[in-house]
Amino acid sequence: MSSGMIPAQPEKILRALGQVWTSLGKEERQQGQPTVLRACAMTLIIITDEEDEDSISATQTLVELMQAHPSRAIVLRGDSSAENGLAARVFAQCWKPFGKAQQICCEQIEVSASPERWLEVGPTILGIIVPDLPVVVWCRLKSAFRPKGKISNAGLGNLLELATKSIVDTRGAKFEDALVVLADWMTSGRLIADLEWTRLTRWRETIATVFEEEPAASVRSRVDNVEIGYDGDTLPASALYMGGWLGRAIKARPSFHREKGLEPGLTRVSMKAPDLEITLSRVASTCLRVKIGEQEHQVSLGSGSLYELMHEELTVLGSDPVFSDVFVRAGGLLRDAA
């Protein structure tokens, strides 16, 4: 059930949503089925533009996320061909839990804005967020990390001001530029998460587990050499985040080595003590080889899908002091490597 294109004005968008719910309830009653259940635990705003080559995947991820994190989803697209420069449409995403007759439905609003109308988006979004519930912004704009992007930085800032938490992905971005932008956002008191940090969860869990048991447990304080391997033209955020995280527990300053990997990003972490070497290396897109001295085994990295990453970030909407500290350390490592 969806509406056609309508002017992107809060009162008209909310009226269209009411009509969608009325129609859904009427259809259910006519079919003699239970009334639909309206579910919403947050407002989830996805900001994208014409440069987002993976926007279809993001939209599919949104549908999956709604079942675990019911929300009023607002997909905001920077679109130079937007009707009248600023337009919207609304519809419901519905599903039936296994073995249940009642439909559960969430709201989705799509807003298209041309670059010259971007400053008008903030008031529109403010008028359609769900009161008294968290607001999460998933910013997929690559231009957000550039000094002069198509999207107005002032307009983007207005949207971030609404957010309980903002989620970005620095994969593929020049981290030197992203560092400046994200540091500015954090200094302004905004709660920021980076999916490149989220991708390291399984790496960090594995390293923590290794150092909980012998023989690694007794040598952690004696690790005097840390090497971090990466694939890419420039130092990626994942390698710098790993270096910053290790620096919280290991005094040795990491060195970074470019090497051929299965995909761009973090490829290897080696930690050496005088009498023991511990190495984690990616051997497949979803698998890590862990070598502790002469012993070796493999662990799963999970799928690393957008759904998996976003699900992890949406599960915890509070602050992440570890990431905040690691982000500062990563900036220091990047400056030292320059």
Image: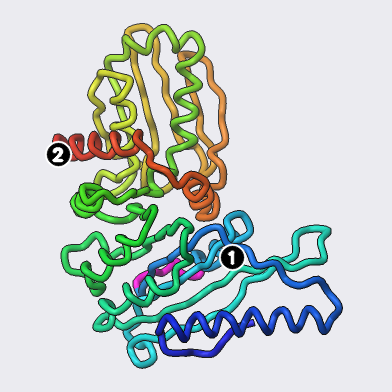
State yes or no: residue 52 in magenta: yes
Instruction: Please provide percent x and percent y for residue 197.
Output: 38, 42
Q: Magenta part of the protein: which range?
A: 51-56
Find residue 11 and report its horizontal and vertical position in percent: 45, 83
Above or below, 285 relative to 4:
above
Main secondary structure of the magenta stretch? loop
The 10 Å Cα crowd at callout 1, few under 14, some 14 to 19, many 20 or more, is: some
- Determine whether the residue tagged by mark 1 lies in a helix, strand or loop: helix
Which residue was labeled with disc 1?
A: 63
The residue lying toward the viewer, choosing from 32 and 297, is 32
Q: Residue at x 48, y 19 (%)?
A: 210
Read off the residue under disc 2: 335
* Residue 83 lies in quadrant: bottom left
Report the side of 308 relative to 325 (left or right): right
Q: Earlier in the sequence, mark 1 or mark 2?
A: 1
Q: Amino acid at mark 1?
A: Val
**Residue positioned 46% across, 37% down in the render:** 201
Q: Which image quarter holds the N terminus? A: bottom right
Number of marks:
2
* Residue 142 falls left or right of residue 338: right
- Farthest residue, direction front: 132
Please identify, in this view, whether the residue under mark 1 or under mark 2 is nearer the observer.
1
* Residue appearing at x 25%, y 37% in the figure: 330
